[in-house]
Image (tube, grey):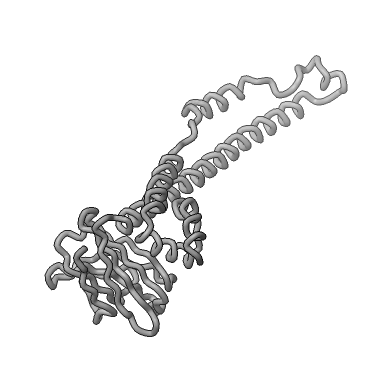
Protein backbone atom coordinates (compact mmCIF):
# COMPACT_ATOMS: atom_id res chain seq x y z
CA UNK A 1 0.00 0.00 0.00
CA UNK A 2 1.44 3.38 -1.04
CA UNK A 3 1.98 6.32 1.32
CA UNK A 4 -0.64 8.30 -0.61
CA UNK A 5 -3.19 5.55 0.04
CA UNK A 6 -2.29 5.38 3.74
CA UNK A 7 -3.02 9.11 4.09
CA UNK A 8 -6.65 8.41 3.15
CA UNK A 9 -7.28 5.89 5.95
CA UNK A 10 -7.50 8.28 8.92
CA UNK A 11 -11.31 8.28 9.04
CA UNK A 12 -11.70 4.52 8.73
CA UNK A 13 -9.02 4.01 11.39
CA UNK A 14 -10.71 6.41 13.80
CA UNK A 15 -13.96 4.44 13.38
CA UNK A 16 -12.22 1.08 13.89
CA UNK A 17 -13.30 0.06 10.38
CA UNK A 18 -10.05 -1.16 8.81
CA UNK A 19 -9.25 -4.83 8.20
CA UNK A 20 -6.35 -6.13 10.27
CA UNK A 21 -3.64 -5.86 7.60
CA UNK A 22 -4.56 -2.28 6.69
CA UNK A 23 -4.91 -1.27 10.35
CA UNK A 24 -1.43 -2.52 11.21
CA UNK A 25 0.09 -0.91 8.11
CA UNK A 26 -1.58 2.38 9.00
CA UNK A 27 -0.39 2.23 12.62
CA UNK A 28 3.18 1.77 11.41
CA UNK A 29 2.65 4.77 9.13
CA UNK A 30 1.34 6.85 12.05
CA UNK A 31 4.71 6.76 13.75
CA UNK A 32 6.22 8.82 10.94
CA UNK A 33 3.30 11.02 9.82
CA UNK A 34 2.48 13.97 12.08
CA UNK A 35 -0.40 15.14 9.87
CA UNK A 36 -2.17 11.76 10.02
CA UNK A 37 -1.61 11.58 13.77
CA UNK A 38 -3.29 14.94 14.32
CA UNK A 39 -6.20 14.04 12.06
CA UNK A 40 -6.72 10.69 13.81
CA UNK A 41 -6.79 12.36 17.23
CA UNK A 42 -9.41 14.87 16.06
CA UNK A 43 -11.58 12.27 14.31
CA UNK A 44 -11.35 9.85 17.27
CA UNK A 45 -12.46 12.57 19.68
CA UNK A 46 -15.42 13.40 17.43
CA UNK A 47 -16.37 9.73 17.06
CA UNK A 48 -16.27 9.29 20.82
CA UNK A 49 -18.65 12.21 21.34
CA UNK A 50 -21.03 10.87 18.68
CA UNK A 51 -20.88 7.39 20.17
CA UNK A 52 -21.93 8.69 23.56
CA UNK A 53 -25.07 10.35 22.20
CA UNK A 54 -28.27 8.87 23.63
CA UNK A 55 -31.90 9.00 22.58
CA UNK A 56 -34.57 10.46 24.84
CA UNK A 57 -36.28 7.70 26.81
CA UNK A 58 -40.05 7.57 27.20
CA UNK A 59 -41.36 8.69 30.62
CA UNK A 60 -41.28 5.74 33.08
CA UNK A 61 -45.00 6.12 33.86
CA UNK A 62 -46.08 5.90 30.20
CA UNK A 63 -46.54 2.11 30.10
CA UNK A 64 -48.40 2.03 33.42
CA UNK A 65 -50.71 4.83 32.29
CA UNK A 66 -51.51 3.09 28.98
CA UNK A 67 -52.28 -0.21 30.72
CA UNK A 68 -54.43 1.56 33.29
CA UNK A 69 -56.39 3.66 30.78
CA UNK A 70 -57.05 0.79 28.40
CA UNK A 71 -59.25 -0.90 31.01
CA UNK A 72 -61.68 2.02 30.80
CA UNK A 73 -61.92 2.09 27.01
CA UNK A 74 -65.04 0.43 25.56
CA UNK A 75 -64.01 -2.36 23.18
CA UNK A 76 -67.48 -3.18 21.78
CA UNK A 77 -70.63 -1.22 20.95
CA UNK A 78 -73.43 -1.19 23.61
CA UNK A 79 -76.12 -3.89 23.49
CA UNK A 80 -78.49 -1.49 21.70
CA UNK A 81 -75.92 -0.93 19.01
CA UNK A 82 -74.76 -2.93 16.03
CA UNK A 83 -74.32 -6.27 17.81
CA UNK A 84 -77.80 -6.26 19.36
CA UNK A 85 -79.45 -5.35 16.06
CA UNK A 86 -77.67 -8.20 14.39
CA UNK A 87 -78.92 -10.59 17.03
CA UNK A 88 -75.52 -11.10 18.56
CA UNK A 89 -75.05 -12.37 22.08
CA UNK A 90 -73.94 -9.79 24.68
CA UNK A 91 -72.19 -12.54 26.62
CA UNK A 92 -70.23 -13.62 23.58
CA UNK A 93 -69.37 -10.01 22.78
CA UNK A 94 -68.20 -9.58 26.35
CA UNK A 95 -65.92 -12.57 26.03
CA UNK A 96 -64.46 -11.18 22.78
CA UNK A 97 -63.96 -7.84 24.55
CA UNK A 98 -61.99 -9.62 27.23
CA UNK A 99 -59.92 -11.44 24.62
CA UNK A 100 -59.31 -8.19 22.74
CA UNK A 101 -58.24 -6.43 25.90
CA UNK A 102 -55.91 -9.28 26.82
CA UNK A 103 -54.43 -9.21 23.30
CA UNK A 104 -53.87 -5.46 23.52
CA UNK A 105 -52.14 -5.81 26.87
CA UNK A 106 -50.01 -8.68 25.56
CA UNK A 107 -49.10 -6.70 22.45
CA UNK A 108 -48.21 -3.65 24.52
CA UNK A 109 -45.98 -5.77 26.74
CA UNK A 110 -44.39 -7.47 23.72
CA UNK A 111 -43.71 -4.22 21.91
CA UNK A 112 -42.39 -2.77 25.13
CA UNK A 113 -39.96 -5.71 25.38
CA UNK A 114 -38.85 -5.23 21.76
CA UNK A 115 -38.28 -1.53 22.39
CA UNK A 116 -36.18 -2.28 25.48
CA UNK A 117 -34.16 -4.88 23.53
CA UNK A 118 -33.60 -2.49 20.61
CA UNK A 119 -32.54 0.27 22.98
CA UNK A 120 -30.08 -2.09 24.69
CA UNK A 121 -28.59 -3.18 21.36
CA UNK A 122 -28.17 0.45 20.30
CA UNK A 123 -26.62 1.35 23.64
CA UNK A 124 -24.20 -1.59 23.41
CA UNK A 125 -23.20 -0.49 19.90
CA UNK A 126 -22.60 3.06 21.09
CA UNK A 127 -20.48 1.84 23.98
CA UNK A 128 -18.46 -0.45 21.70
CA UNK A 129 -17.87 2.43 19.27
CA UNK A 130 -16.78 4.67 22.13
CA UNK A 131 -14.36 2.01 23.42
CA UNK A 132 -12.91 1.47 19.94
CA UNK A 133 -12.49 5.20 19.41
CA UNK A 134 -10.82 5.59 22.82
CA UNK A 135 -8.46 2.67 22.09
CA UNK A 136 -7.49 4.10 18.71
CA UNK A 137 -6.89 7.52 20.21
CA UNK A 138 -4.64 6.09 22.96
CA UNK A 139 -2.64 4.00 20.45
CA UNK A 140 -2.26 7.04 18.19
CA UNK A 141 -1.05 9.19 21.10
CA UNK A 142 1.76 6.74 21.82
CA UNK A 143 2.76 6.20 18.20
CA UNK A 144 2.80 9.92 17.39
CA UNK A 145 4.34 11.18 20.64
CA UNK A 146 7.46 13.34 20.10
CA UNK A 147 9.46 11.07 22.44
CA UNK A 148 8.19 7.75 21.00
CA UNK A 149 11.02 5.19 21.06
CA UNK A 150 10.88 1.93 19.09
CA UNK A 151 12.41 -1.49 19.76
CA UNK A 152 12.01 -4.51 17.47
CA UNK A 153 12.73 -8.21 17.89
CA UNK A 154 12.54 -11.42 15.88
CA UNK A 155 10.00 -13.71 17.55
CA UNK A 156 10.91 -16.78 15.52
CA UNK A 157 9.24 -18.57 12.59
CA UNK A 158 9.03 -15.32 10.65
CA UNK A 159 7.16 -13.46 13.40
CA UNK A 160 8.27 -10.02 14.45
CA UNK A 161 7.42 -7.80 17.38
CA UNK A 162 7.81 -4.05 17.78
CA UNK A 163 7.24 -2.09 20.96
CA UNK A 164 6.76 1.69 20.95
CA UNK A 165 7.16 3.52 24.27
CA UNK A 166 6.37 7.13 25.12
CA UNK A 167 7.54 8.35 28.51
CA UNK A 168 5.54 11.58 28.17
CA UNK A 169 2.31 9.61 27.59
CA UNK A 170 3.56 6.90 30.03
CA UNK A 171 2.14 4.13 27.85
CA UNK A 172 3.47 1.50 25.44
CA UNK A 173 2.09 -0.22 22.33
CA UNK A 174 3.13 -3.67 21.11
CA UNK A 175 2.81 -4.40 17.39
CA UNK A 176 2.90 -8.08 16.38
CA UNK A 177 3.33 -9.40 12.87
CA UNK A 178 2.85 -13.02 11.70
CA UNK A 179 2.76 -14.48 15.21
CA UNK A 180 1.73 -18.12 15.46
CA UNK A 181 -1.53 -18.62 17.31
CA UNK A 182 -1.12 -19.96 20.85
CA UNK A 183 -2.09 -23.58 21.60
CA UNK A 184 -5.75 -24.30 22.37
CA UNK A 185 -6.79 -22.99 25.77
CA UNK A 186 -3.74 -20.71 25.91
CA UNK A 187 -3.11 -17.02 25.34
CA UNK A 188 -0.14 -14.71 24.90
CA UNK A 189 0.30 -12.51 27.96
CA UNK A 190 2.37 -9.33 27.96
CA UNK A 191 4.49 -8.19 30.92
CA UNK A 192 6.33 -5.07 32.02
CA UNK A 193 9.82 -5.78 33.36
CA UNK A 194 10.15 -3.70 36.54
CA UNK A 195 13.80 -4.38 37.37
CA UNK A 196 13.37 -8.14 37.12
CA UNK A 197 9.85 -8.25 38.55
CA UNK A 198 7.23 -9.00 35.91
CA UNK A 199 4.03 -6.95 36.00
CA UNK A 200 1.05 -8.04 33.88
CA UNK A 201 0.40 -5.74 30.91
CA UNK A 202 -2.60 -7.51 29.36
CA UNK A 203 -3.49 -10.29 26.95
CA UNK A 204 -3.31 -10.56 23.19
CA UNK A 205 -6.21 -11.70 21.02
CA UNK A 206 -5.57 -15.46 20.63
CA UNK A 207 -7.18 -15.47 17.18
CA UNK A 208 -5.01 -12.66 15.77
CA UNK A 209 -1.62 -13.28 14.15
CA UNK A 210 -1.18 -9.53 13.57
CA UNK A 211 -2.20 -7.22 16.38
CA UNK A 212 -1.61 -3.82 17.97
CA UNK A 213 -1.96 -3.98 21.74
CA UNK A 214 -2.01 -1.02 24.10
CA UNK A 215 -0.24 -2.44 27.14
CA UNK A 216 -2.34 -2.27 30.28
CA UNK A 217 -1.13 0.23 32.85
CA UNK A 218 1.58 2.87 32.89
CA UNK A 219 5.16 2.26 31.83
CA UNK A 220 6.56 4.02 34.92
CA UNK A 221 10.08 2.69 35.52
CA UNK A 222 9.80 -0.48 33.45
CA UNK A 223 12.96 -1.19 31.49
CA UNK A 224 11.42 -3.65 29.05
CA UNK A 225 8.64 -6.12 28.35
CA UNK A 226 8.17 -9.85 27.93
CA UNK A 227 5.72 -12.26 26.30
CA UNK A 228 4.74 -15.65 27.71
CA UNK A 229 2.16 -18.33 26.91
CA UNK A 230 -0.40 -18.60 29.73
CA UNK A 231 -3.71 -20.36 30.40
CA UNK A 232 -6.78 -18.62 28.97
CA UNK A 233 -7.60 -15.63 31.16
CA UNK A 234 -3.95 -15.02 32.03
CA UNK A 235 -1.85 -15.53 35.13
CA UNK A 236 -0.78 -13.37 38.06
CA UNK A 237 2.87 -14.27 37.39
CA UNK A 238 4.56 -15.88 34.35
CA UNK A 239 4.24 -19.67 34.32
CA UNK A 240 6.29 -20.42 31.19
CA UNK A 241 9.57 -19.47 29.57
CA UNK A 242 9.31 -16.16 27.69
CA UNK A 243 8.55 -16.19 24.00
CA UNK A 244 10.44 -12.90 23.83
CA UNK A 245 12.11 -10.30 26.05
CA UNK A 246 12.48 -6.77 24.70
CA UNK A 247 14.31 -3.83 26.22
CA UNK A 248 12.85 -0.34 25.93
CA UNK A 249 14.93 2.18 24.01
CA UNK A 250 15.42 5.80 25.01
CA UNK A 251 14.00 8.44 22.68
Give the farthest residue toward the right. Answer: 86
Q: Is residue 251 above or below residue 128?
A: below
- Asked if residue 217 shows in the view, the reply is no
Q: Nearer the viewer, residue 65 or 165?
A: 165
Residue located 56% across and 27% down the image? 67
Please state if 14 lies on the left or on the right of 168 as rendered.
Answer: right
Residue located 32% across and 70% down the image? 162
Q: Is residue 189 above or below residue 15?
A: below
- Asked if residue 5 shows in the view, the reply is yes
Asked which quadrant contains residue 136, the reply is bottom left
Q: Nearer the viewer, residue 47 or 25?
A: 25
Q: In the rendering, at what x and y percent does residue 32 appear? A: 36, 60
Asked which quadrant contains residue 97, the reply is top right
Q: Is residue 154 above or below residue 62?
A: below
Please state if 45 lies on the left or on the right of 142 as rendered.
Answer: right
Q: Nearer the viewer, residue 237 or 194?
A: 194
Q: In the rendering, at what x and y percent does residue 169 appear? A: 24, 53
Q: Nearer the viewer, residue 183 or 38?
A: 38
Q: In the rendering, at what x and y percent does residue 22 appear? A: 48, 64
Residue located 43% across and 65% down the image? 24
Number of numbered callouts drawn: 0
Q: Quadrant of the C terminus?
A: bottom left
Amino acid sequence: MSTAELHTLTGAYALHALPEDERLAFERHLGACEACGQEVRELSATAARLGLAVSVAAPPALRERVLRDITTVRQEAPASGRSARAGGSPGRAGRWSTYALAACVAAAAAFGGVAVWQNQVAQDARQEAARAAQHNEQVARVLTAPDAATSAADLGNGARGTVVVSQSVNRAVFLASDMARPPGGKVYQLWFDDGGTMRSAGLMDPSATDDAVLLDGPVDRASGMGITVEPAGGSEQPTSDPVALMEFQDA
